């Protein structure tokens, strides 16, 4: 699957979500207002501190051969989170940030209705998964995030 095809597929899925579920999902998950406000400083510092702590994990940090999270992955994650609308970022709890054994970081949001959004962020790529109203699922893998387009696509998709 080519990068161009993946990007086109992501944009197609985002357009479908805009038409069918975006308003409802955004209201349920992020109470999105459309305004770009800077995140609350204390909340942002807590998220940043937790992310930076992942780069200090040793080899085999989980006793099953886990690879440490690189500073580059942390930097990519911070760049992506800064692109999110403030209300959505405020919904992300620091407990929703977790390192994986593959040197990636996941950011998970879940609301009281059980709708779930997860982004797995690596150095150059991310994976996106969402469980939406009516048990609809959306998934996209290997989304490039080095380019501005990839960051924008993930930011828009994660507004669910």
Image (cartoon, grey):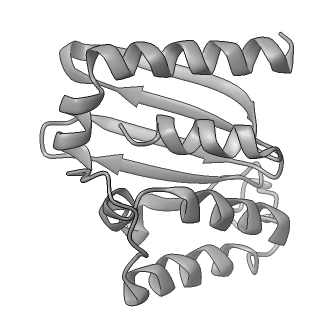
Image quadrant in which you'd find residue 155 = top right
Task: Find residue 148 and report its horizontal and vertical position in percent.
Answer: 75, 46
Towards the viewer: 29 or 98: 29
User: On the picture, is 12 further left or further right than 100?
Assistant: left
Q: Which residue is drawn at 49% across and 76% down?
A: 47
Task: Find residue 139 and report its horizontal and vertical position in percent.
Answer: 53, 21
Q: Is 14 located above or below residue 112 in the figure? A: above
Residue 33 can be seen, yes or no: yes
Query: In this view, which residue lies farthest toward the front?
Result: 35
Q: Is 34 located above or below residue 55 in the figure? A: above
Towards the viewer: 70 or 25: 25
Image quadrant in which you'd find residue 59 = bottom right
Task: Find residue 158 and report its horizontal and vertical position in percent.
Answer: 46, 41
Q: Residue at x 39, y 89 (%)?
A: 42
Q: Is 141 located above or below residue 39 in the figure? A: above
Q: Residue at x 41, y 29 (%)?
A: 130
Q: Could you tell me which quadrant the N terminus lies in?
A: top right
Residue 59 can be seen, yes or no: no
User: On the picture, is 135 further left or further right than 117?
Assistant: left
Query: In this view, which residue lies farthest toward the left?
Result: 113
Q: Could you tell me which quadrant the C terminus lies in?
A: top left
Task: Find residue 33 and report its horizontal and vertical position in percent.
Answer: 24, 53
Q: Is 44 located above or below residue 64 in the figure? A: below
User: On the picture, is 41 further left or further right than 23?
Assistant: right
- The total number of labels drawn is 0
Q: Which residue is drawn at 84% across and 65% down?
A: 72
User: On the picture, is 144 further left or further right than 87?
Assistant: right
């Amino acid at each position: 699957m080519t990068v161009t095809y993946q990007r086109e597929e992501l944009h197609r899925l985002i357009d479908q979500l805009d038409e069918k579920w975006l308003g409802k999902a955004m209201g349920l998950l992020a109470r999105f207002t459309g305004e770009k406000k800077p995140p609350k400083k204390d909340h942002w510092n807590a998220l940043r501190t937790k992310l930076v702590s992942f780069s200090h994990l040793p080899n085999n940090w989980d006793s099953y051969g886990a690879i440490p999270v690189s500073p580059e992955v942390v930097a990519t994650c911070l760049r992506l989170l800064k692109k999110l609308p403030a209300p959505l970022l405020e919904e992300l709890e620091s407990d929703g940030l977790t390192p994986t054994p593959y040197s990636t970081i996941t950011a998970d949001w879940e609301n009281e209705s059980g709708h779930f959004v997860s982004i797995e962020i690596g150095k150059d790529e991310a994976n996106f998964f969402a469980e939406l109203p009516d048990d609809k699922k959306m998934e996209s893998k290997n989304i490039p995030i080095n380019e501005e387009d990839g960051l924008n696509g993930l930011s828009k998709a994660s507004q669910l």
